[in-house]
Image (cartoon, rainbow, N blue to C red):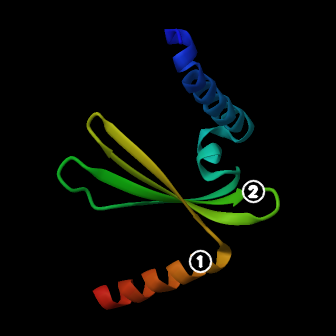
Amino acid sequence: MDTFGSILPFWVVFFAIAAFFLIRVARFGFKGAMFGGQIVESFGQVETDKVAFFSGRVRTHVIDKGEEKIVGMEVVFSAPLAWQMTPVRLTAAQARELAAQLADAASHAN
């Protein structure tokens, strides 16, 4: 088999994945594509304590996934020459449970 024929399946899969992601970015925007739906509303952000050169923040959003709306937390860490965004998707019940656990931990931290 020639060289092109042996790597053709790789390129087909690569371009299929790239096309899928580009369609999602065009439809929902970059952040929406990461969450899997349209960002309907954002509720601000909380900055984390800065450690050495690292800083972080957490933003909260409501995400419309078509059949349901979910809560999205955008966790961002940045440093010189580095940036990482991790999307966290939660149902309304999970978001309420997390909020209760955070409130409980905060009351014990004082």
Residue 47 in view of the camera? yes
- Can you say whether 68 is above or below 102 in the image? above
- Can you say whether 24 is above or below 62 in the image? above
Label 2: element kind: loop
Label 1: element kind: helix
* Residue placed most toward the observer, 31 or 1: 1
The amino acid pointed to by label 2 is: Lys
Which residue is pictured at 34% across the width and 61% down the height? 48
* Residue placed most toward the observer, 82 or 19: 19
Q: Residue furthest front?
A: 1
Residue bearing mark 2: 65
Which residue is pictured at 57% across the width and 28% down the height? 14
Image coords of residue 25 (percent x, y): 66, 36
- The quarter of the picture where residue 105 lies is bottom left
* Residue placed most toward the observer, 24 or 9: 9
- Can you say whether 102 is above or below 60 in the image? below
Image coords of residue 41 (percent x, y): 68, 57
Residue bearing mark 1: 94
Q: Residue furthest left?
A: 52
